[in-house]
Amino acid sequence: MTYSFLLIGAGSIGQRHARNLVQLGETLGGVFNPSPEKARQISQASGAEAFTSIEKAFEKAGNYDAALICSPNHLHMQHVKLCLSHDLDFFLEKPAFMSSAGAGPVLKAAAKRRLKTLVGCNMRFNAGFIEFERIVRSGRLGSIVQLLAHNSSYLPEWRPGTDYLKNYAAKKATGGGILLDGIHEIDYVRALAGRVSGVSCLCGTCGGLGIETEDTADVVLMHAGGARSAVHLDYLSRLPARWVKAIGTEGAAAYDFISGKAVVRTGLVAAQEQDLHEDRNRMYVREMEHFIRVLDGKEKSACPLADGLSDVQIADAAKKSSARSGLMVKV
Ligand SMILES: NC(=O)c1ccc[n+]([C@@H]2O[C@H](COP(=O)([O-])OP(=O)(O)OC[C@H]3O[C@@H](n4cnc5c(N)ncnc54)[C@H](O)[C@@H]3O)[C@@H](O)[C@H]2O)c1
């Protein structure tokens, strides 16, 4: 069975998902973007009906099987509510919301309507991460004591040729800040080590980029099962780095998202290395393939709205903790 999608927000990630879905043989039935040229571009490439009014796009909600919400962060709540009122399943880009305030009733309504939802957690569909997760879950490392995750980049180099100060990341009103941008790391440590019961964090705007939002965050998460995670996030490093490491009672494993190198060592034998580098788009294709199987009813969503909201609650708690000089905040 193939599906027809309504794309909301035809920016960089929306265009990517639209391209990937069409290549997977799905139909892009409609595209909404307030600036007409972007909607038109996608419409010309895919045959989708272009809308510059969200109301007009939702008048035809019955024509679509699901929505792809790829709008700026501060609009996610509004677009999720529209999907709820039209009983439309949805994929929602990360972070689910800018904060968890007011999200409880939205989550209840989605559950009541039994909507199929997936929040963008694309790092979990990276080939190397899939292997890392397989090793962690296999028990080869014994009990997991600690997860370390590191995501460091330089905001001015994110989008060459554009002014980073105009990027949503730089402004509070559009839901910027490294805690929400780097929510992938919070998401996958929660998925791997389980529910988070407490959060301690120091974050701030310290790097002279002239942005309103926090540019660095060091977060410690206490998992209810006893493991601990340490997550470092920043927009400031001219030496980009993105990696994850698991320390267990019987071994350790690490994966470097940039080089694609995975390493595992158990006992006292030499570490085993694998090269799992792949084209970056592959993980986004896998993410959409997964969403299609969720719509088919063949797979459980890897990150339903409830989990996406848990990640945002952790980010909220991290900000609260930092405002109290790193005091542990219960989640
Ligand atoms: N998972 C990932 O790898 C990833 C990567 C980038 C962005 N994102 C997320 O995707 C979302 C979009 O980011 P982006 O990088 O594509 O941003 P972008 O700035 O490239 O695109 C945003 C688009 O939304 C449009 N827009 C503005 N107002 C709108 C409205 N009222 N309704 C609908 N669309 C509107 C803009 O015109 C633009 O086309 C953000 O939530 C971001 O956090 C995720």
Image (cartoon, rainbow, N blue to C red):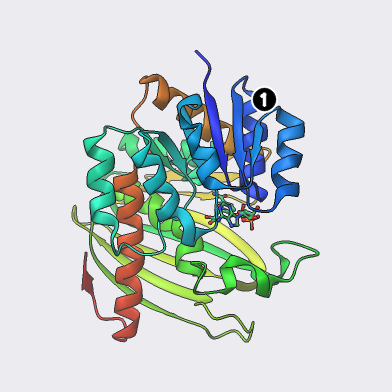
SS at circle 1: helix
Q: Quarter containing ligand 1?
A: bottom right
Q: Position of residue 46 (x, y in %)?
A: 71, 29
Question: Relative to 114, is 215 above or below?
Answer: below
* In the rendered image, the vertical position of residue 205 relative to residue 240, given as above or below: below
Q: Residue 273 location in percent, x, y?
A: 56, 41
| Visible residue check, residue 309 | yes
> In front here: 28 or 152?
28
Quadrant location of the C terminus?
bottom left
Query: At x 50% / y 72%, what residue is drawn?
Result: 173
Along the viewing direction, whichever of 127 and 102 lies nearer the viewer: 102
Question: Which kind of residue does numbered mark 1 sit on?
Answer: Gln
Asked if 206 appears above or below 149 in the picture, the reply is: below
At a point 30% along the width and 78% down the height, the residue shown is 321
The residue identified by callout 1 is 23
What x and y, as percent, mark residue 249?
A: 28, 51
Q: Residue at x 19, y 52 (%)?
A: 225
Query: Taking 122 as reference, is 296 left or right?
Result: left
215 left or right, relative to 330:
right
Q: Position of residue 266 (x, y in %)?
A: 39, 44
